[in-house]
Amino acid sequence: MGAGVIAQDAAGECLAWRTRNFRFAANPSLAESLAAREAIDLGIKEGWSHIILEGDCQSVINKLIDSTEDFSTIGPVIADIRFMMR
């Protein structure tokens, strides 16, 4: 599975990008959550204090917005992202 992340400014210009391969089979929600984690990591490493995260999987976005603990298979990745966003 692979993840690609593109960071753009308000005008749509590319500011940074990253790709990453993961060496295990994944379901779509896990793939999307790992891509979201890569996006947040990229923003942190670039020193950006405001990040707008967009994704194709609404359930992952909803889990990031919801503050309750997630016990699903992607729960640990969601927890990582929430910790990184602090």
Image (spheres, rainbow, N blue to C red):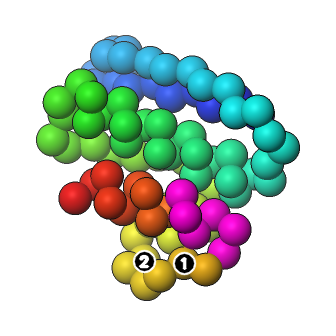
| Residue at 69% from the left image edge and 57% from the top image edge | 29
Q: Which residue occupies 70% across, 33% down?
A: 22
Placement of 36 over or under 47, stated as above or below: below
Was residue 51 drawn as part of the magenta stretch in this picture? no
Q: Which mark is residue 60?
A: none
Q: Amino acid at mark 2?
A: Asp
Magenta span contains residue 76: yes
Pick the front one: 66 or 82: 82
Q: Quadrant of residue 44?
A: top left
Q: Which residue is mark 1?
A: 70
Residue 82 in the image, given as x and y percentages of width and height: 36, 62
What SS does tag 1 mark? loop
- Image vertical order of residue 27 relative to residue 22, above or below: below
Q: Quadrant of the N terminus?
A: top right
For residue 65, above or below residue 3: below
Whole-percent x and y of residue 46? Answer: 24, 25
The residue located at (47%, 45%) in the rendering is 37
Callout 1 environment at 10 Å: few (<14), some (14 to 19), or many (20+)? some
Which residues fall within the magenta stretch? 72-77
- Structural distance between the alpha carbons of marks 2 and 1: 9 Å
Where is the C terminus found, in terms of image quarters?
bottom left
Which image quarter: residue 35?
A: top right
Residue located beneath label 2 in the image = 66
